[in-house]
Image (cartoon, coloured by chain):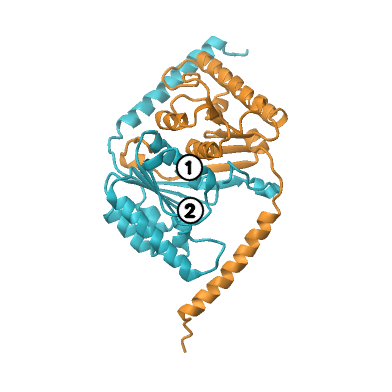
Chain colours: A cyan, B orange
Amino acid sequence: MTTEMTEAEINARHAEKMKKKKAVRDKILASKTVEKGLIIVHTGKGKGKSTAAFGMIFRSLGYGFPVGIVQFVKGSWETGERIALEKFGDLVTINRLGEGFTWETQDRERDIAAARKAWETAKELIKSGACHIVLMDELNIVLRYDYLPVDEVVAFLRDEKPADVHVIITGRNAPEALIEIADLVTEMELVKHPFRSGVKAQKGIEF
Amino acid sequence: MTTEMTEAEINARHAEKMKKKKAVRDKILASKTVEKGLIIVHTGKGKGKSTAAFGMIFRSLGYGFPVGIVQFVKGSWETGERIALEKFGDLVTINRLGEGFTWETQDRERDIAAARKAWETAKELIKSGACHIVLMDELNIVLRYDYLPVDEVVAFLRDEKPADVHVIITGRNAPEALIEIADLVTEMELVKHPFRSGVKAQKGIEF
């Protein structure tokens, strides 16, 4: 004997199941009451680390919150973001182009100086308390090359960041000490990449 | 006998190493010549799936490219993005609010009808060729609940998507058949989440 459910039975069972799910969800949400400026890290070998950070930046801009952006590596993002950011005028503070590490030169001293300068800019933006969120794009790369001491960065974020300021740090190979003090860490994992089939970086997609 | 390198030697060695890295990088980039509209999937349990998709949307808008956005689940993003998108006027086409699946009701028939309607909108936007990129936000959720047949979605993207249109599909549990035909798949993995320490969703960060 088959016991196939009628469409009405499927719907009723579904409603019951979803109702339970919603109850669990509501209960979890209600237990979350703390508000604080988060230390957010996007790491991993996959795409989307900086892109998701920019998504958050645009979301904050949508609310009219001021944002700060410090680019530690030149060229990881450029034209598309920059033009879009211009729409929001004074809400956006970006460090000047050319301050970051670049693949185009192989000058370690210059890169260390550039990393230091970008870090000083980031610290100022964070400490000022004027930004809802400060993005330190590709900071992990600079830490990886020891262009800045991890300890210094961690100590600053832990002890000197104003409680209500959010920061996002992107880049592969986030150091353990940074993950330790972070509130929200996401690893972007590469599952499949079009480079493998010879597809080049395209406008609006990769840059 | 110690053989510590001088600062100058470290710099020279570094320059040599980076030069090699750059050569490899340049060679790889030069081999990538294909341009095509990509099928992009953001999946996984971590944050940033929709947010990174919005980052790409804003990047395209920065270039002045028209974009399409279809929301399959209500409330996964809202105010922040919407206000920011308004800055770009006619370049943005969004499906109407309330068409998507929602946790607020437990009405399977309504949700199936809503999924169908959103999918028809998405197909139209994609086929029109008017958009540089079309985001199908949380489509994976709808596929997961079998509100839309995966086969139908896969067949359409494979056979009917114009060659130069990019699409992004987000949501947990991307079905295998979709990953199969995708060009770029990223899995966002949760490493650490502030929910665990009672921090609630905050404006500009989570929504």
Residue at the bottom extreme of this rendering: B1
Residue at 27% in and 49% down:
A162
Q: Residues within 10 Å of mark 2 (few under 14, many from 20)?
A: many
> Measured from the top left, where is residue A126 in percent x and y?
32, 51
Whether residue B48 is visible: no
Tag shown at residue A171: 2
Query: In the rendered view, does A129 fall on the left or right side of A105?
Result: left
Q: Nearer the viewer, residue B146 or A105?
A: A105
Residue at 65% in and 33% down:
B165
* Residue A180 falls in image quadrant: bottom left
Residue type at the position of mark 2: Gly
* Residue B179 falls in image quadrant: top right
Q: Secondary structure at mark 1?
A: helix
> Measured from the top left, where is residue A167 in percent x and y?
36, 48
Q: Nearer the viewer, residue A61 or B126?
A: A61
Q: Earlier in the sequence, mark 2 or mark 1?
A: 1
> Measured from the top left, where is residue A47 in percent x and y?
55, 46
Whether residue A53 is visible: yes
**Chain under numbered label 1:** A
Residue at 31% in and 57% down:
A156
- Which residue was labeled with disc 1? A52
Q: Residues within 10 Å of mark 1 (few under 14, many from 20)?
A: many
> Measured from the top left, where is residue B162 in percent x and y?
69, 31
Tag shown at residue A60: none
**Chain under numbered label 2:** A
Relative to A2, residue B148 above or below: below
